Image (spheres, rainbow, N blue to C red):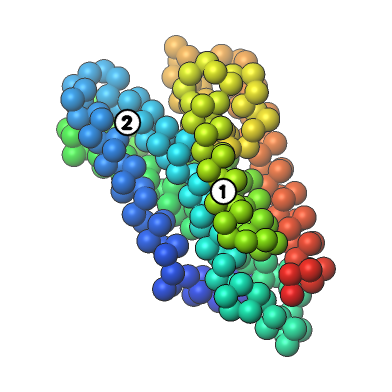
C-alpha cells in the first residue's frame, strides 16, 4: 500500500495539481485581507476573517476546485492509457484506486491547512489588536476538510468513469448551491444537511457557533454532530463503492 501511495504521489510532481493546492489558498487569504483591512480595529475583525475566508474558500473554491483536481487526476490516467498497465500487474486494481483517493484527500488536507494558516497570518499582517484564535481556526480547518471529502471522492469516481469535465461541470453547480444555500444567511437552513456541497461551509459556521458561548445551543450541537458523522460515513461508503466499481475492471 505504501508503494502505491508513493507512486501515486510522484505522478503529480509535474502537474498543475500542486500549484492549485498552494496558490488558491494564497488568493483566498489575499481577498480576506483586502476586505478586512478597513475593519481591522473592530471587535469583529477575526470573525470577519473567518467568514470571508470560509465564504470564498468553501462556497466558491471547494466545489469547483475539488472537481478540477479530481478531473485532472482522471485525465492524467486517461492520457496514459486509462490504467491498461494494470493488466500486467498482479496487484489488486482497487489498491491503486484507494491510493489515488488517499493522495487526493492528502492534497485537500494540505490545501486546507495552508488556507487556514494563511488566514491567521493575514490577521497578523493586518495587526488585528485581538488574540489570535489559533485553536478555533484549527478545528474549523479539520471540519472544513472532513466536510469536503464526500464531494472529492464523488468527483474522482466521476472523473475515472467519464471525462474530466464532468466533475468540473457538476462542481460549478455545487458552487452555486454552496454559495446560496450554504452561506451565512438563513436561506437553506432546513435543507443544507442534505446537500453535500454545503457541508464544508456550514461546518465552519457551526463550529464557530459552538465555540462561542453566546451562540452555542443544544440544537446546533446536535445538528453539527449528526451531519458530521453522516459526512464521514458517506465518505467511506463512496470510497468503498468506487473501489469496488474500479476493482471490477470496468475502467481497464
Q: Residue at x 62, y 26 (%)?
A: 192
Residue 36: give x, y in percent of width and height: 25, 29
Above or below: residue 63 compared with residue 18: above
For the N terminus, the image quarter is bottom right
- Residue under numbered circle 1: 169
Closer to the observer: label 2 or label 1?
1
Among the 4 quarters of the image, the one containing residue 80: bottom right
Which class describes the residues within 10 Å of circle 2: few (<14), some (14-19), or many (20+)?
A: many
Which residue is more in the foreground, 241 or 222?
A: 241
- Residue with the most extreme top position: 214
For the C terminus, the image quarter is bottom right
Counting residues from the N terminus, which is met first, the one under dot 2 or under dot 1?
Answer: 2
Above or below: residue 85 compared with residue 146: below
Residue 139: give x, y in percent of width and height: 47, 37
In screen coordinates, is 245 left or right of 239?
A: right
Q: Dots 2 and 1: beta carbons under 8 Å?
A: no
How far is mark 2 from mark 1, CA to CA?
A: 29 Å
Q: Say which element carries label 1.
A: helix
Residue 137 in sight: no
Which class describes the residues within 10 Å of circle 1: few (<14), some (14-19), or many (20+)?
A: some
Q: Which residue is drawn at 72% across and 50% down?
A: 238
Above or below: residue 125 compared with residue 87: above
Among the 4 quarters of the image, the one containing residue 53: top left
Residue 72: give x, y in percent of width and height: 52, 63
- Residue under numbered circle 2: 49
Which residue is more in the foreground, 32 or 141?
A: 32
Amino acid at each position: 500500500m505504501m508503494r502505491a501511495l508513493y507512486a501515486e504521489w510522484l505522478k503529480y510532481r509535474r502537474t498543475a495539481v500542486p500549484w492549485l493546492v498552494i496558490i488558491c489558498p494564497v488568493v483566498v487569504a489575499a481577498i480576506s485581507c483586502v476586505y478586512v483591512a478597513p475593519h481591522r480595529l473592530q471587535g469583529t475583525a477575526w470573525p470577519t476573517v473567518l467568514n470571508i475566508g470560509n465564504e470564498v474558500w468553501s462556497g466558491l473554491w471547494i466545489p469547483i476546485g475539488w472537481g478540477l483536481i479530481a478531473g485532472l487526476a482522471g485525465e492524467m490516467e486517461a492520457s496514459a492509457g486509462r490504467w491498461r498497465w494494470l493488466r500486467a500487474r498482479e496487484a489488486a486494481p482497487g489498491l491503486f484506486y484507494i491510493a489515488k483517493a488517499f493522495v487526493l484527500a492528502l492534497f485537500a488536507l494540505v490545501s486546507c491547512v495552508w488556507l487556514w494558516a494563511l488566514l491567521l497570518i493575514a490577521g497578523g499582517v493586518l495587526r488585528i489588536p485581538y488574540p489570535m484564535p489559533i485553536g478555533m481556526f484549527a478545528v474549523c480547518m479539520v471540519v472544513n476538510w472532513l466536510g469536503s471529502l464526500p464531494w472529492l471522492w464523488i468527483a474522482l469516481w466521476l472523473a475515472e468513469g467519464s471525462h474530466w469535465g464532468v466533475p468540473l461541470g457538476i462542481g460549478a453547480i455545487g458552487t452555486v448551491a454552496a454559495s446560496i444555500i450554504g452561506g451565512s444567511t438563513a436561506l437553506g437552513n432546513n435543507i443544507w444537511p442534505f446537500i453535500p456541497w454545503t457541508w464544508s461551509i456550514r461546518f465552519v459556521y457551526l463550529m464557530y457557533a459552538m465555540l462561542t458561548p453566546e451562540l452555542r445551543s443544544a440544537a446546533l450541537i446536535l445538528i453539527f454532530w449528526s451531519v458530521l458523522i453522516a459526512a464521514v460515513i458517506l465518505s467511506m461508503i463512496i470510497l468503498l463503492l468506487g473501489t469496488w466499481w474500479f476493482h471490477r475492471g470496468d475502467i481497464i
